[in-house]
């Protein structure tokens, strides 16, 4: 069959003629201008680095263009090389190539850059403001060409978006190995990212952006629902009715926007404050939040009414969250559950809007007088924390949502430290909820994409997954029955909730056994011709994928939460157990230098090889983390790893001996 223009374009990679300059499209959401951080010498280096991709006779024309991009945007994106074809995950059969595995990766890359999915598609940013798939369009083009040309006897090596090349390997090796932002530890501060990214030698891959595994907002809706649901259960003593309970939080942005939807699924009243009218209106128009209120008195009255009637409703308050906490305190409105999802990982450049300033005033001040703006932010955080403290003294359960609220509040001098002066007063969502209730048992964000692009395939995989979980639940121990039930309910409602944006993807939380059984059932259905090939993966934010002391591994209490052996071991282990691609990143979620996170992708094609690989790799991919959590003396992980050893005689894990606290304390006293 002759190649169509899309396939020809992929195989051409870098056009012989320099393409015309593309107009800056104002309809598209663009990345902010990045810091001008390079010295003149470093700018020259950045330019030379960019020109490496092109023949010398083109350098003069391109140098002028690239230098302008560097000055205007703080980065060289090579906009003129952005392809003209539509960017979306095509059915796998439409990709040119010699390797089905490589074609599956092309599909996933295009999904991450789909305009419906990506946050700043022209800057190759999928989410989180800086989560990059590539640094520039030539890297994208070259990578797609390599993938289209490679065989199953080669591995493509990706250095932070740059395709270093194809290296001979073997059929069972990963087709692609990705590293993103891997720095020498001393060069891993936020400004190092700005500098080395501007030079074109590294990138911030976030979690699923630079590993080609992002599946749109569905992943966040599910994770947030699981968190809110379990948080409510934590405070609903003795299965007390949860209706009429009030959840107060902030943020209707990228991830935070899932909070009201999760509140509705969990069955509570939620109030989410948002200072940016555009963000609030977007979520309202998408049906993710039911009502928008702009006046505090009206808000208080509406909440009292909702409590009286035990409504399930999500309310957006257009204004500052500090005002909501203070108003509810004054009015004695009891808040059952509280959190915060302002972007405090980025406090000085628009992540957190201080109380007392309007949205517009804050935007102006942060650009014109950053020092004064910082003072406002810190003052606001002190007020914010003081009001939360007022509420918790009345019984509110407050948790940190991994957005650095407690960290930044403590740095601002807020009353947020526990009595020991080391810990915070409040737990993180991982410490109290996802860690002990999910990760320690092996439950985490397993996902799959139907590579045929056919919605009927997704429907069939939903049915298969549901059937597998229902069968498993019959014999599940009591400890994990709730998680199984939640995920069965989720998968049953998934079609109706219309969660697909981009590729035909689904997420659910499953443990090692669940992931393996679901994957095996998919592989069988593919072998029988019931469905097309399926790509498996997960978020890095999982049992074993991420070492992040204030988030994913914040419920590790043996001192090892500042180590990153688990994430590194995980990606190495996945790579020789049959993963189709693996990735390891610095910085996802909480910032450059603060976390190491890794992931995988695996193509199921119905073959016996796929069956062997999925069993071996998924088993390791979950049990590595459980083993480590068990060694850290986490009770649920000790339970889970012992169960895993009973099921698999080749698994032998070192178990911890737990000291007798009384004996230990008296020994310690006697020797001090
Ligand atoms: N949802 C999750 O699963 C999850 C998990 C871990 C961490 N987080 C963290 O949550 C934070 C939010 O992520 P996001 O993608 O939604 O970011 P975002 O920047 O898109 O959204 C944050 C929103 O908060 C609003 N805001 C800021 N200050 C405010 C204030 N004082 N009052 C009211 N509104 C205010 C902003 O206008 C913005 O719309 C990040 O720090 C992220 O790392 C989320």
Image (tube, rainbow, N blue to C red):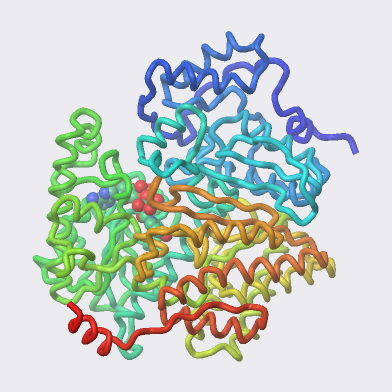
Within the image, what quadrant is residue 495 found in?
bottom right
126, 246: nearer the viewer: 126
Within the image, what quadrant is residue 71 found in?
top left
Residue at position x 65%, y 85% in the image: 471
474, 114: nearer the viewer: 474
State left or right for residue 78 relative to residue 143.
left
Image quadrant occupied by the N terminus: top right
Residue at position x 53%, y 53% in the image: 216
Viewer can see residue 288: no
State left or right for residue 570 relative to residue 603.
left
462, 192: nearer the viewer: 192
Residue 283 point in image, percent of width and height:
40, 53
Question: From this viewpoint, which residue is outermost toward the front?
Answer: 671
State left or right for residue 484 relative to residue 261.
right
Residue 194 point in image, percent of width and height:
40, 33
Residue at position x 62%, y 53% in the image: 582
Image quadrant occupied by the C terminus: bottom left
Within the image, what quadrant is residue 135 found in?
top right
Question: From this viewpoint, which residue is outermost toward the left?
Answer: 330
For residue 360, above or below residue 432:
above
Residue at position x 59%, y 43% in the image: 114
Residue 164 point in image, percent of width and height:
65, 35
Viewer can see residue 85: yes
């Amino acid at each position: 069959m002759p190649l169509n223009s899309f396939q020809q374009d992929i195989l051409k990679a870098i056009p012989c003629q320099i393409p015309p300059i593309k107009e800056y499209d104002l309809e598209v959401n663009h990345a902010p201008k990045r810091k001008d951080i390079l010295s003149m010498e470093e700018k020259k280096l950045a330019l030379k680095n960019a020109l490496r991709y092109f023949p010398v006779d083109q350098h003069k024309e391109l140098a002028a263009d690239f230098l302008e991009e560097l000055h205007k945007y703080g980065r060289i994106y090579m906009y003129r090389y952005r392809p003209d074809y539509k960017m979306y995950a095509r059915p796998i059969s439409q990709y040119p190539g010699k390797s089905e595995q490589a074609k599956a990766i092309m599909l996933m890359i295009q999904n991450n850059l789909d305009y419906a999915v990506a946050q700043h598609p022209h800057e190759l940013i999928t989410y989180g403001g800086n989560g990059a798939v590539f640094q520039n369009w030539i890297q994208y083009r070259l990578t797609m060409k390599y993938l289209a040309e490679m065989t199953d006897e080669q591995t493509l090596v990706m250095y932070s978006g740059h395709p270093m090349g194809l290296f001979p390997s073997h059929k069972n090796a990963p087709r692609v190995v990705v590293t993103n932002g891997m720095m020498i530890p001393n060069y891993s501060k936020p400004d190092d990212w700005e500098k080395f990214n501007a030079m074109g030698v590294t990138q911030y891959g976030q979690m699923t952006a630079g590993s080609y595994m992002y599946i749109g907002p569905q992943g966040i809706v599910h994770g947030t629902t699981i968190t809110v649901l379990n948080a409510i259960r934590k405070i609903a003593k003795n299965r007390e009715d949860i209706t009429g309970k009030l959840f107060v939080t902030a943020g209707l942005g990228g991830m935070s926007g899932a909070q009201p939807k999760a509140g509705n699924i969990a069955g509570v009243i939620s109030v989410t404050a948002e200072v940016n009218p555009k963000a609030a209106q977007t979520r309202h128009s998408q049906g993710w939040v039911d009502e928008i209120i702009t006046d505090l008195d009206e808000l208080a009255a509406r909440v009292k009414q909702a409590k009286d009637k035990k409504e399930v409703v999500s309310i957006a308050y257009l204004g500052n969250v500090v005002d909501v906490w203070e108003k509810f305190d004054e009015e004695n409105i009891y808040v059952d559950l509280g959190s915060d999802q302002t972007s405090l990982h980025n406090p000085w450049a628009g992540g957190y809007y201080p109380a007392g300033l309007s949205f517009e005033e804050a935007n102006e001040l942060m650009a014109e007088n950053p020092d004064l703006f910082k003072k406002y932010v810190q003052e606001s955080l002190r007020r914010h924390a003081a009001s939360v403290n007022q509420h918790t003294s009345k019984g509110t359960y407050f948790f940190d949502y991994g957005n650095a609220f407690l960290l930044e509040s403590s740095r601002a001098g807020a009353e947020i430290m526990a009595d020991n002066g080391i810990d915070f007063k409040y737990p993180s969502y991982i410490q109290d909820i996802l860690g002990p209730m999910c990760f320690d048992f092996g439950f985490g964000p397993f996902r799959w994409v139907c590579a045929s692009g056919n919605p009927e395939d997704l429907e069939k995989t939903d049915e298969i997954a549901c059937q597998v979980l229902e069968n498993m639940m019959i014999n599940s121990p009591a400890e994990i029955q709730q998680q199984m039930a939640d995920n069965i309910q989720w998968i049953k409602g998934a079609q109706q909730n219309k969660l697909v944006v981009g590729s035909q993807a689904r997420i659910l939380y499953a443990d090692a056994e669940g992931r393996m059984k679901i994957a095996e059932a998919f592989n069988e259905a593919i072998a029988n011709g019931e469905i097309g090939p399926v790509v498996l993966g997960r978020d890095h934010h999982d049992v074993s994928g991420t070492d992040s002391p204030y988030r994913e591994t914040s419920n590790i209490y043996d001192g090892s939460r500042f180590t990153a052996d688990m994430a590194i071991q995980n990606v190495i282990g996945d790579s020789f157990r049959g993963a189709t691609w693996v990735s390891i990143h610095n910085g996802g979620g909480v910032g450059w230098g603060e976390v190491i996170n890794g992931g995988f992708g695996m193509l199921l094609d119905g073959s016996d090889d796929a069956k062997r690989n999925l069993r071996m790799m998924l088993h390791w991919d979950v049990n590595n983390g459980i083993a480590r959590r068990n060694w850290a003396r986490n009770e649920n992980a000790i339970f889970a790893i012992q169960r895993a050893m009973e099921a698999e005689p080749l698994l032998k894990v070192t178990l911890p001996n737990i000291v007798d606290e009384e004996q230990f304390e008296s020994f310690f006293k006697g020797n001090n």
